[in-house]
Image (tube, rainbow, N blue to C red):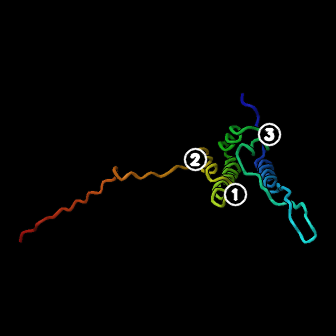
């Protein structure tokens, strides 16, 4: 007999997922800023990178259990949207320098099916065949 789901209601799960993203987006760090009056500590945005693992910890579950939710029709869209948001965060962060591009590339290849496209000229068939038909008459 399987254990009952920790989240029975997709709406409640979506609410908890939204809380995770809000928490990630709201993190700040203090930076020293020089002003005309001297020096101040100013909070500046320092978002936490989105990850499936971080989301799983936030939901008090594990990565595989979270991914298993997507196998259930009622939760498919909720989990799919979360995964897409995490994936977009990796792509955008790798492009704009928020994240180390190599780390973003590694995560996208290993968790989202991205791959390098290799074109090998030796495997290409560059032959052109022309058929000429002579018509008599």
Alpha carbons under labels 2 and 1: distance apart = 18 Å
Alpha carbons under labels 1 and 3: distance apart = 27 Å
Asked if residue 22 lies left or right of residue 103, the reply is right
- The disc, 3 or 2, on the residue closer to the chain's N-terminal end is 3
Q: Which residue is mark 1?
A: 98
Q: Residue at x 39, y 51 (%)?
A: 120
Residue farthest to the right, as pictured: 37
Residue 90 location (% of width, % of height): 66, 53
Residue 98 location (% of width, % of height): 70, 57
Judged by depth in the image, the label closer to the viewer, 2 or 1, is: 1
Residue farthest to the top, as pictured: 1
* Label 3 secondary element: loop
Query: Which residue is at the front of the view, 10 or 109?
Result: 109
Q: Residue at x 76, y 38 (%)?
A: 61
Residue 111 location (% of width, % of height): 61, 45
Does residue 112 sit above or below 92 in this rendering?
above
Instruction: Check residue 128 in the rendering and tell me which mark sits there, or answer none.
Output: none
Q: Report if the CB atoms under discs 3 and 2 are less than 8 Å apart.
A: no
Q: Which residue is mark 2?
A: 109
Judged by depth in the image, the label closer to the viewer, 3 or 2, is: 2
Using the rendered view, name the quadrant where residue 27 is placed. bottom right
Residue 54 location (% of width, % of height): 75, 44
Image quarter of the C terminus = bottom left
Q: Residue at x 25, y 60 (%)?
A: 128
Residue farthest to the left, as pictured: 137
Image quarter of the N terminus = top right
Alpha carbons under labels 3 and 2: distance apart = 26 Å
* Label 2 secondary element: helix
Q: Which residue is mark 3?
A: 60
* Label 1 secondary element: loop
Label 1: few (<14), some (14–19) or many (≥20) C-alpha neighbours in 10 Å? some
- The disc, 2 or 1, on the residue closer to the chain's N-terminal end is 1
């Amino acid at each position: 007999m399987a254990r009952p789901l920790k989240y029975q209601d997709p709406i409640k799960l979506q609410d908890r997922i939204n809380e995770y993203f809000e928490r990630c987006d709201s993190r700040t760090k203090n930076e020293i800023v020089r002003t005309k009056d001297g020096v101040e500590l100013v909070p500046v945005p320092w978002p936490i990178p989105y990850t499936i693992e971080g989301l799983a910890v936030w939901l008090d579950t594990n990565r595989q259990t979270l991914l298993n939710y997507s196998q259930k029709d009622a939760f498919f869209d909720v989990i799919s949207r979360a995964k897409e948001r995490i994936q977009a965060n990796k792509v955008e962060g790798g492009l704009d320098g928020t994240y180390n591009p190599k780390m973003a590339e590694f995560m996208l290849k290993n968790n989202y099916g991205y791959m390098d496209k290799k074109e090998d000229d030796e495997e290409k068939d560059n032959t052109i065949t022309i058929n000429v038909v002579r018509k008599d008459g």
